[in-house]
Image (spheres, rainbow, N blue to C red):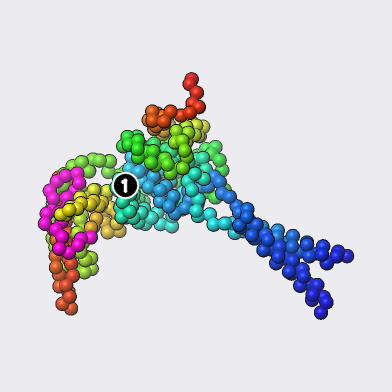
Amino acid sequence: MSERRGSLYLLTGLILGLGIGLIYSLRIYPVEYTDISPALLSPRDKDQYRALIAVAYLANRDLLRARARLALLKDEDTYSALAAQAQRWLAEGKPADEARALGLLAADLLRSQATLLAPTVTMTTTPTPLAGAPPSPSSPNPIPPSPSPTSSVASTPFASPQPNSTFQTSFILRKRESVCDPALGKGLIIVYVWDAQGNELPGVELMVSWEGGEDRFFTGLKPELGLGYADFSVREGVVYSVRVASGGEPALNLSAPTCTAANGETFPGVWILEFMQE
Amino acid sequence: MLGRWVRFVIAIALGAAAGIGYGWVLAPAPAAEHAASDLRIDYRSDVVLMVAEAYASDQNLAAALARLSFLNHPQPAEVIQEAIHFGERYGYSDTDLQKMRSLLAAIETLTPLVGTSAP
């Protein structure tokens, strides 16, 4: 009995000490992080970092560099993170050029992945680590401060449309069709934008206006539905017009078509518009 | 033979060491709430380079300043200078350095950097 009591006081001491140690190390004097990598940023700052990568990409069209920078964030799915943020950016009223850049980068990443999967393409995308940079405990430094001649050549297969070249031309309305198919969605204006060669164009700004209001949206923010795809939710009874912001033929008098389902219920249908570069 | 009190204190010390080891090494405080100002110098420099790349394209100084505020530094010009020095030391390309210098020059026209020595 007395031996048991002896071991109990030791156990009590251990538990007491453990509690003191935990309070001290987690509350009073927790680990402080300095010199962190982008992967350790708060979600809000990660978004900001991602937006910066996208606007820099919009400026330099260097996908290799953008890819290396995005890798620092250690997103599970880089493309989804970009596309989702592009949507969120627009919804939250953040700068439209940043939303467009995010969507365009997502689309170009997706396109480059498809290129990489092609059997004829063989290339290395690992950027050269920064020589002499401070070591990182968690990851090698993938910042590509200056693309070497080799990396420029290597990035050629990723080449994207040159900035502004597509957005400053005008577009013709090639197709305008109302569809009653709940599988496509309800109360939507769906837009596809193509270049003169018939390739889908991401990052094209579209203007939608109605009596007393105006908004804009971009193609390529849902690359899983097509790089030239964009959609806009409409309200029943409101008449909209849509055009490509850079100019061209508008689609006028668009109000959600009234459709009847098989069970007799009505629902707002979908407008499908196709704009093609002249 | 150690007295009971001495053994009790040793037990507390061992427990405290285990607790501190757990809190500092095994399961430190969550690391997901850090600000961009805590970024390592090479990452901060790359942020500046991204802003400079965008500025070189759009020449929008207001947007550049807003983007630099991400680093939460009261003197944007100092951050850019720091990035330029880092880039010069670690072999950034002349093009990249030039973009950062252009951004610095544009910002210094608004807010001359205190303490910048003349050549």
- Along the line of sight, the residue nearer the viewer: A185 or A275: A185
Q: Residue at x 77, y 70 (%)?
A: A9
Q: Residue at x 70, y 67 (%)?
A: A15
Q: Residue B89: x and y, percent?
A: 51, 32
Left or right of A253? Residue B105 is: right
Query: In front here: A270 or B119?
Result: B119
Q: What is the chain identity of the residue bearing mark 1? A: A
Residue A155 visible = no
Residue name at image x 43 percent, y 57 percent: A76
Give how far across and how far down residue B65 sits, in percent: 39, 38
Where residue A137 appears, x then y in whole percent?
57, 48
Residue reaching furthest to the left: A253
Image coordinates of residue A205 in percent, x first then y, are 23, 48
- Residue A255, picture quadrant: bottom left
**Can you name the residue that lies furthest to the top here?**
B119
The magenta span reads A233-253
Q: Residue at x 24, y 48 (%)?
A: A204
Residue A49 visible at all:
yes
Where is B96 relative to B18, above or below? above
A246, B10: nearer the viewer:
B10
- The quadrant holding residue A117 is bottom left
Residue A242 left/right relative to A102: left
- Kindly identify the amino acid type of the residue bearing the numbered disc 1: Pro
Kind of element beneath mark 1: loop
Q: Closest to the observer: A245 or A224? A: A245
Examine the rendered structure and indicate whether residue B100 appears above or below residue A88.
above
Q: Residue tagged by mark 1?
A: A95
The stretch drawn in magenta includes residue A222: no
Q: Quadrant of the N terminus of chain B?
A: bottom right
